[in-house]
Image (tube, helix red, strand yellow):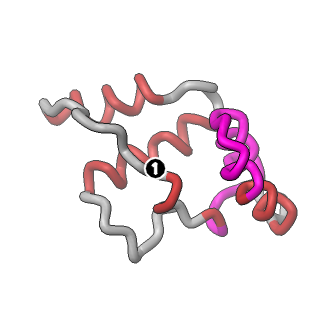
Amino acid sequence: MIKKSSKLPLIERKFCSCLIKVGENILNPFGICTKSVYSTRGKKRTKQVKCFNNYDFKKFSKKQLSAYKKSTKNKKKHKIINKYLKKTKVKN
């Protein structure tokens, strides 16, 4: 789900992946992912993780794309997600 060329540290990659996987079922997965990825390792998330530019949307299912679109309010991101929603075959 994360681009191979991404320069995110491993813990941030796991956090971003968690957001997508948990976000399919829950509108706001940030608390769950912060606890499962950071707190279980005894760390704190001290900054906002920039996941959007590191996602490989081609690997997302239609359900994941739709859930991610609902969770963001940014219109530019909606356009990009809509482009992939049109291309995505049903993988659910």
Q: Residue furthest bottom?
A: 5
Q: Position of residue 58 (x, y in %)?
A: 66, 68
Circle 1: residue type? Ser
Residue at 77% from the left image edge and 55% from the top image edge? 79
* In the image: residue 2, left or right of residue 12: right
Residue 46 location in percent, x, y?
22, 33
Q: As displayed, is residue 89 above or below residue 4?
A: above
Residue 5: image location, x then y, percent: 39, 76
Question: Is 68 covered by the magenta stretch?
Answer: yes
The x and y percentages for residue 44 are: 19, 30
Disc 1 element: helix
Asked whether residue 85 is drawn in magenta, I would say no
In this rendering, the count of numbered labels is 1
Q: Name the residue located 36 percent from the left edge and 54 percent from the top edge.
A: 13
Residue linked to disc 1: 17
12 relative position to 81: left or right: left
The residue sitting at 36% across, 44% down in the picture is 49
Q: Residue at x 72, y 45 (%)?
A: 75
- Tell which of 83 and 60 is nearer to you: 83
Q: Which one is nearer the viewer's eye here, 9 or 77?
A: 77
Which stretch is magenta? 58-79
**Neighbourhood count class around disc 1 (C-alpha, 10 Å): few under 14, some 14–19, many 20 upward:** some
Q: Main secondary structure of the magenta part?
A: helix
Task: Examine the rendered structure and indicate whether residue 26 appears above or below residue 76.
Answer: above
